[in-house]
Image (cartoon, grey):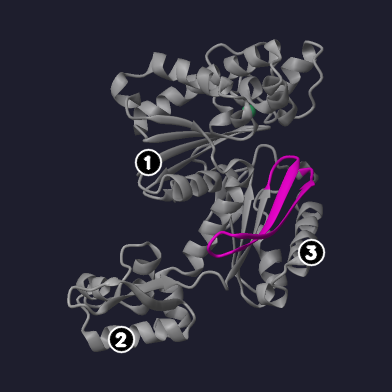
Amino acid sequence: MTGTTAGQILQLVRSGEVTTRRELQEQTGLSRSTLTQRLAMLTAGGYLSEAGAQHSGVAGRPAKGLSFVDTDKYVLTADLGATHARLALQDAAGAVIAESTSRIRIQDGPDPVLAAVLDGFEALLASAPAGSAARDGLCGIGIGVPGPVNVATKRLQQPPIMPGWDDHPVTTVFEERFGVPALIDNDANLMGLGEARRHHPDVPSLLYVKVGTGIGAGLILGGRPERGIAGGAGDIGHIRIAHPVAGAVCACGANGCLAAHASGGALVRQLTERGIAAETPTDVARLVQAGNADAIALVRTAGQLVGEVLATAVALLNPGVLVIGGSMAMTHEHFLIGVRESLYERTVPLATRNLTITASALQDRAAIEGARIMVVDHVFSAAAVDARLGLA
Ligand SMILES: [Zn+2]
């Protein structure tokens, strides 16, 4: 790596591969003077700090610790669901500076929803204790949406539950308002990314399944979402199950979809049919937490149906961790028990022997955390940093 650029050096530090000047010199093979010059550029640019003695070097000289300067850089993030929006102002390290939640109707289309998000972002910046520092230090915006996204074009691709959003230039309105790069991805991809990088950094293959109003999945390989060729990877909610119930019509218009039988939305309908009051997937989770026997039985059956569909994915991919997120992660393991039952029944022991099946640790902050990581990875990539330093 004798040609290691300043941006690539920052990448090595950000990833934790190197923490000292000595390690950097060993890894890159750069001469002492070249290394000093590149580190000076990164320090002057506000990207890197070289703090005092971290531990003693062999010759008794203190080894200086290198770190990415991430607490004076800010990211605005939005997690847009079918009926709910969560907005946050975070620093690049992940600390939440300000946050808000509101009710939205994604089916109303992009104009009213994006206008509300723009207002919400302005309100977060205005309320931030850091004040103008947050606005001045804003480096990017990350948006999560409940539909397939082609990240190359930054456009939604025929989202089943988002009429009017197909091919809409969502990120443009944010870039024009705030003058920083805006990125967009599917919410399950971002939730998986957040879980993977924050809680399972050493697991090369993680499958995240969001079970909320609908069902979607994100596959994280080597710390990055695998999106498929058109952004359609992980859209498992519309797989037709083996034994569909007559009349269970999906939001996409088809019959027999997994989401029409096993999502939080489907459970709301099943409980309502039994005369049990529930309006949202969160109500379903609360009924389970309160020990309602019908809710517990229905949630467990829903878990089994999701496990049935996931068995194929687990057999194909042999992931290390399967994370269940969304409202069904808050059902005291009942949903997870159902998933485990049908997964273990349908796969060979090798596929599940080392598989951890767990509820989301980040819970309803998983998407904004993933959105923050997506933005930081992009804005502080080696190529982007070199370009800003005038090196590329
Ligand atoms: Zn469907």
* Closer to the camera in the image, 18 or 322: 18
Label total for image: 3
Mark closer to the chain start, 2 or 3: 2
Above/below status of 28 relative to 290: below
Labels 2 and 3 touching (C-beta < 8 A): no
Q: What mark, if any, has residue 36 been given in the picture?
A: 2
Q: Which amino acid does label 1 sit on?
A: Ser
Q: Nearest the camera: 120 or 72?
A: 72
Q: Which residue in the structure is indicated by mark 3?
A: 123
Q: Which of marks 1 and 2 is nearer the N terminus?
A: 2
- How busy is the neighbourhood of tag 2: few (under 14 within 10 Å), some, or many (20 plus)? few
Helix, strand or loop at label 1? It is strand
The residue at the point 64 percent across, 15 percent down is 296
Q: Is residue 132 visible?
A: yes
Q: Is mark 2 on a helix, strand or loop?
A: helix
Look at the picture and state if 122 lies above or below 6: above
Which span of residues is magenta-colored?
A: 80-105
Q: Please say whether residue 201 is one of the residues in the magenta stretch.
A: no
Q: How far apart are marks 1 and 2 (CA)?
A: 37 Å
Q: Nearer the viewer, residue 374 or 360?
A: 360
What is the chief secondary structure element of the magenta stretch?
A: strand
Residue type for callout 2: Thr
Based on the displayed image, in which of its 4 quarters is residue 271 positioned?
A: top right
* Structural distance between the alpha carbons of marks 3 and 1: 38 Å
> Taking 2 as reference, is 182 left or right?
right
